[in-house]
Image (cartoon, rainbow, N blue to C red):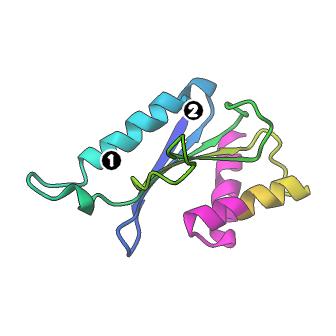
Amino acid sequence: MRLGIFAIDSGGIRYSIEFQRLDSGGNPKRASFNASIIDASSLKPGQDFAELPEVYMIFITEHDVLGEGRPLYTADRVISESGRAFGDGSHIVYVNCEDYDTSTPLGKLTLQEIADYSGLSLSTIRRMANKLEAANQ
Protein backbone atom coordinates (compact mmCIF):
# COMPACT_ATOMS: atom_id res chain seq x y z
CA MET A 1 0.00 0.00 0.00
CA ARG A 2 1.17 3.53 -0.75
CA LEU A 3 -0.25 6.82 0.41
CA GLY A 4 1.00 10.03 -1.14
CA ILE A 5 0.71 13.70 -0.38
CA PHE A 6 1.86 16.52 -2.66
CA ALA A 7 2.00 20.05 -1.28
CA ILE A 8 3.38 23.46 -2.18
CA ASP A 9 4.07 25.87 0.65
CA SER A 10 3.67 29.66 0.54
CA GLY A 11 7.31 30.01 -0.56
CA GLY A 12 6.81 27.69 -3.55
CA ILE A 13 8.74 24.74 -2.07
CA ARG A 14 7.34 21.41 -3.32
CA TYR A 15 6.86 18.46 -0.96
CA SER A 16 6.09 14.96 -2.11
CA ILE A 17 5.47 12.72 0.89
CA GLU A 18 4.94 9.01 0.40
CA PHE A 19 4.11 6.40 3.00
CA GLN A 20 5.68 3.14 1.81
CA ARG A 21 4.87 -0.30 3.18
CA LEU A 22 6.92 -2.24 0.61
CA ASP A 23 10.71 -1.99 0.71
CA SER A 24 10.81 -1.83 -3.09
CA GLY A 25 8.80 1.42 -2.95
CA GLY A 26 11.69 3.14 -1.18
CA ASN A 27 14.27 2.49 -3.91
CA PRO A 28 16.69 5.47 -4.09
CA LYS A 29 16.48 5.57 -7.90
CA ARG A 30 12.70 5.78 -7.62
CA ALA A 31 13.13 8.74 -5.26
CA SER A 32 15.42 10.49 -7.77
CA PHE A 33 13.03 9.71 -10.61
CA ASN A 34 10.03 11.10 -8.72
CA ALA A 35 11.94 14.27 -7.81
CA SER A 36 12.89 14.73 -11.48
CA ILE A 37 9.24 14.45 -12.52
CA ILE A 38 8.37 17.23 -10.07
CA ASP A 39 11.23 19.34 -11.49
CA ALA A 40 10.16 18.72 -15.09
CA SER A 41 6.58 19.75 -14.38
CA SER A 42 7.55 22.87 -12.39
CA LEU A 43 8.71 25.05 -15.27
CA LYS A 44 6.91 26.33 -18.34
CA PRO A 45 8.63 26.20 -21.75
CA GLY A 46 11.25 28.95 -21.93
CA GLN A 47 11.26 29.57 -18.19
CA ASP A 48 14.74 30.00 -16.68
CA PHE A 49 16.16 26.97 -14.84
CA ALA A 50 17.10 29.27 -11.95
CA GLU A 51 13.37 29.39 -11.21
CA LEU A 52 13.19 25.68 -10.41
CA PRO A 53 11.67 25.36 -6.95
CA GLU A 54 13.20 23.54 -4.04
CA VAL A 55 11.82 19.97 -3.87
CA TYR A 56 11.61 17.63 -0.88
CA MET A 57 10.92 13.99 -1.78
CA ILE A 58 10.03 12.37 1.57
CA PHE A 59 9.59 8.62 1.98
CA ILE A 60 8.13 7.41 5.25
CA THR A 61 8.94 3.70 5.22
CA GLU A 62 7.71 0.81 7.31
CA HIS A 63 11.18 -0.77 7.32
CA ASP A 64 14.73 0.53 7.31
CA VAL A 65 15.15 0.31 3.53
CA LEU A 66 18.59 1.96 3.60
CA GLY A 67 19.82 -0.43 6.30
CA GLU A 68 21.91 1.81 8.57
CA GLY A 69 19.60 1.75 11.58
CA ARG A 70 18.94 5.47 11.51
CA PRO A 71 15.51 7.01 12.13
CA LEU A 72 16.15 9.64 9.46
CA TYR A 73 18.25 9.77 6.29
CA THR A 74 18.71 12.99 4.33
CA ALA A 75 20.25 12.81 0.85
CA ASP A 76 21.42 16.10 -0.62
CA ARG A 77 23.80 16.36 -3.55
CA VAL A 78 27.31 17.57 -2.73
CA ILE A 79 30.46 18.24 -4.71
CA SER A 80 32.54 15.18 -3.86
CA GLU A 81 35.91 16.92 -3.89
CA SER A 82 34.99 19.72 -1.53
CA GLY A 83 31.89 18.51 0.33
CA ARG A 84 30.17 21.77 -0.61
CA ALA A 85 26.44 21.64 -1.27
CA PHE A 86 25.65 21.37 -4.98
CA GLY A 87 22.69 23.67 -4.49
CA ASP A 88 20.26 22.17 -6.98
CA GLY A 89 17.35 22.40 -4.54
CA SER A 90 16.65 18.67 -4.56
CA HIS A 91 16.33 16.91 -1.19
CA ILE A 92 15.46 13.28 -0.58
CA VAL A 93 14.47 12.29 2.95
CA TYR A 94 13.74 8.81 4.31
CA VAL A 95 11.97 8.38 7.63
CA ASN A 96 12.50 4.88 9.03
CA CYS A 97 9.48 3.77 11.05
CA GLU A 98 10.73 0.24 11.74
CA ASP A 99 11.09 0.98 15.44
CA TYR A 100 8.16 3.37 15.39
CA ASP A 101 6.84 3.59 18.91
CA THR A 102 5.90 7.09 20.07
CA SER A 103 6.37 6.05 23.70
CA THR A 104 10.13 5.65 23.14
CA PRO A 105 12.67 8.47 22.79
CA LEU A 106 13.46 7.27 19.22
CA GLY A 107 9.78 7.32 18.24
CA LYS A 108 9.35 10.82 19.64
CA LEU A 109 12.54 11.94 17.88
CA THR A 110 11.31 10.55 14.56
CA LEU A 111 8.04 12.48 14.86
CA GLN A 112 9.92 15.67 15.75
CA GLU A 113 12.29 15.26 12.79
CA ILE A 114 9.35 14.76 10.41
CA ALA A 115 7.83 17.95 11.80
CA ASP A 116 11.11 19.88 11.51
CA TYR A 117 11.77 18.82 7.92
CA SER A 118 8.20 19.09 6.66
CA GLY A 119 7.36 22.37 8.35
CA LEU A 120 4.19 20.77 9.69
CA SER A 121 3.32 21.03 13.37
CA LEU A 122 4.09 18.08 15.62
CA SER A 123 0.36 17.72 16.40
CA THR A 124 -0.41 17.47 12.65
CA ILE A 125 2.29 14.81 12.23
CA ARG A 126 0.88 12.87 15.21
CA ARG A 127 -2.63 12.99 13.72
CA MET A 128 -1.27 11.74 10.37
CA ALA A 129 0.69 8.96 12.10
CA ASN A 130 -2.33 7.88 14.14
CA LYS A 131 -4.54 7.77 11.04
CA LEU A 132 -1.89 5.76 9.17
CA GLU A 133 -1.54 3.31 12.07
CA ALA A 134 -5.34 2.89 12.26
CA ALA A 135 -5.55 2.30 8.50
CA ASN A 136 -2.84 -0.37 8.66
CA GLN A 137 -4.57 -2.38 11.41
Q: Which comes sooner in the sequence, label 2 or label 1?
A: 2
Horizontal side, residue 93 vs residue 79: left or right: right
For disc 1, the neighbor class at 10 Å (few under 14, some 14 to 19, many from 20) is many
Residue placed furthest toward the top:
24
Q: CB atoms at circles 2 and 1 under 8 Å apart?
A: no
* Picture residue at 54% right of the left edge, 41% below the top: 81
Residue placed furthest toward the left:
46
Location of residue 85 in the rendering, given as x and y in whole percent from the top left corner: 51, 54
- Where, quadrant-wise, is the C terminus in this rendering? top right
Residue 26 circle label: 2
Q: Nearer the viewer, residue 77 or 82?
A: 82
Name the residue that disc number 1 marks: 38
Residue 103 visible in this rendered orientation of the protein? no
- Check disc 2 and give the amino acid type: Gly
Residue 118: within the magenta? yes
For disc 2, the neighbor class at 10 Å (few under 14, some 14 to 19, many from 20) is many
* Picture residue at 33% right of the left edge, 47% below the top: 38
Q: Start and end of the magenta stretch?
A: 113-137
Location of residue 131 in the rendering, given as x and y in whole percent from the top left corner: 65, 54
Residue 48 visible in this rendered orientation of the protein? yes
Query: As displayed, is residue 78 above or below residue 14?
Result: above
Q: Nearer the viewer, residue 118 or 48?
A: 48
- Where, quadrant-wise, is the N terminus in this rendering? top right
Location of residue 77 in the rendering, given as x and y in whole percent from the top left corner: 50, 45
Report, in whole angstroms, how far the alpha carbon at label 2 lies from the one at label 1.
17 Å
Residue 46 occupies quadrant: bottom left
- Check disc 1 and give the amino acid type: Ile
Location of residue 136 in the rendering, given as x and y in whole percent from the top left corner: 68, 40
* Picture residue at 60% right of the left edge, 62% below the top: 117
* Picture residue at 63% right of the left edge, 73% below the top: 121
Horizontal side, residue 133 vs residue 16: left or right: right
Mark 2 lies on a secondary structure that is helix
